Image (tube, grey):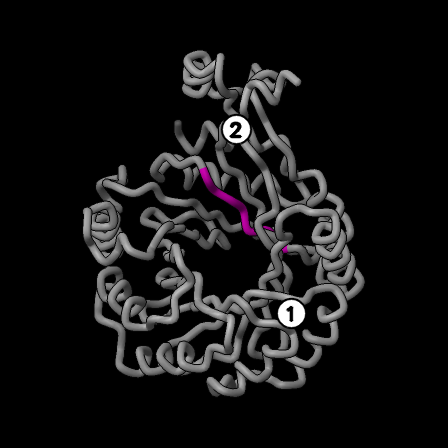
Amino acid sequence: MSLADYLAVVEPHLEPVLVGKRQWLRITGLAAELPDCSVAGFECRLGPDQPRVDFSMKLAPGRLALPERFLAHPVWQRLMSFCEKWTEHGRPLNSRASDIWLEFDLQDAVPADPLPIIFLIYRTRTKDDSEIAENLALLWPRPPSEALRGALHSCMMALPEGSAVPAVGLMISRGIGLLRIEVDGLTCSSLSGFLDSVGWSGSSVELARVKDMFSPVVDRMVLGLDLDGTILPSLGLMFYPGERKPEQLSRFAALIRTLVACGLCDPDKAAALSKWEGVNWRAVQRRAWPRSLYWVDRFMQSRAESAICRYISFVKVAVGPQGHFEAKAYLAYRHTWLDRGDLLK
């Protein structure tokens, strides 16, 4: 099933205030060039007068179906090779790297040969910087510098008890040699200590502002740090809704209200977020249901029903080097199967 098929199903649930017509055309134009996938998402800026939307997708293991012109670029060549090796039995890639996501910056018109940001998601949260460096060497057109490896090692050695790195991002579209690490397990109280220990050069005043804003409504976060041989002053704080239990959903709603009160989220966009989450399935959406899924549903009709789940993956607050704050929501969808017996109850 193509990306276009899935996008056609979820489009009616994206309010124009979050994804405008121009941004949607960029996304669908890019999707026409990309491999099929059943899990993808939209990075929506939440501030007023911020229409930009970026697109991300989860890759399936194995050989990628890509346009020939993409494969003329070493980045796509290496990604193709990585995905093929990823599935080989006994390879070190197969031990921890469970998922690969591609993210595409869509600030302007889609270029003829777009380059992705590549995120590696680890099956078990890692503290092993040598494994990360090995993956970088396989994916980057040139080996990571000693300075970058040193900065990465410093971050890994400074991880507090109970924290680890669940993902790294190769920020290729923004420059070869730029790496993002995500640190899970930090709290508002442990955040400053970790950043001090790695030599973060950002503003302690702005960091204190962040903590004052969000400590009343969150107790846990994922930190995104950018490295290029040094620890760059920009950072991102990611807040996840959790398991959708009432208490967690209440805290997440309080987070959105805080963003609105701080001027980081347009009230209309906040309202639009609440309309995104839900489930599409064939019985209630026959006309727009992709034909390829229709025939699979016919085969599975006595056991399961095909569905597409829409959800908010997380909200992120980015803090720029000049103290500029920006809030984003990451809206996602994924294909799944619903037990037919449960649907008939």
Residue beneath disc 1: 325
Residue at position x 76%, y 68% in the image: 216
Up-down relation of residue 27 to residue 149 (above or below): above
Q: Which residues are magenta?
A: 39-45
- Residue at the disc numbered 2: 8
In the rendered image, the vertical position of residue 302 relative to residue 162, given as above or below: above
Give the quarter of the figure containing the N terminus: top left
* In the image, residue 148 above or below residue 32: below
Q: Quadrant of the C terminus?
A: top right
Among numbered discs 1 and 2, the one appearing first in the sequence: 2
Q: Residues within 10 Å of mark 2 (few under 14, many from 20)?
A: few
Three-letter code, disc 2: Ala
* Res 119 seen here: no
Q: Nearer the viewer, residue 282 or 205?
A: 282
Q: Residues within 10 Å of mark 1 (few under 14, many from 20)?
A: some
Magenta run includes residue 292: no
Instruction: Give the percent coordinates (x, y) of residue 132.
Output: 31, 67
Q: Which mark is residue 130?
A: none
In the rendered image, the vertical position of residue 112 relative to residue 171, given as above or below: above
Identify which residue, 313 or 32, lies in the foreground: 313
Residue 314 appears in the picture as rendered: yes
Decide whether the magenta segment is chiefly helix, strand or loop. strand
Residue 340 image point, x, y percent: 55, 19
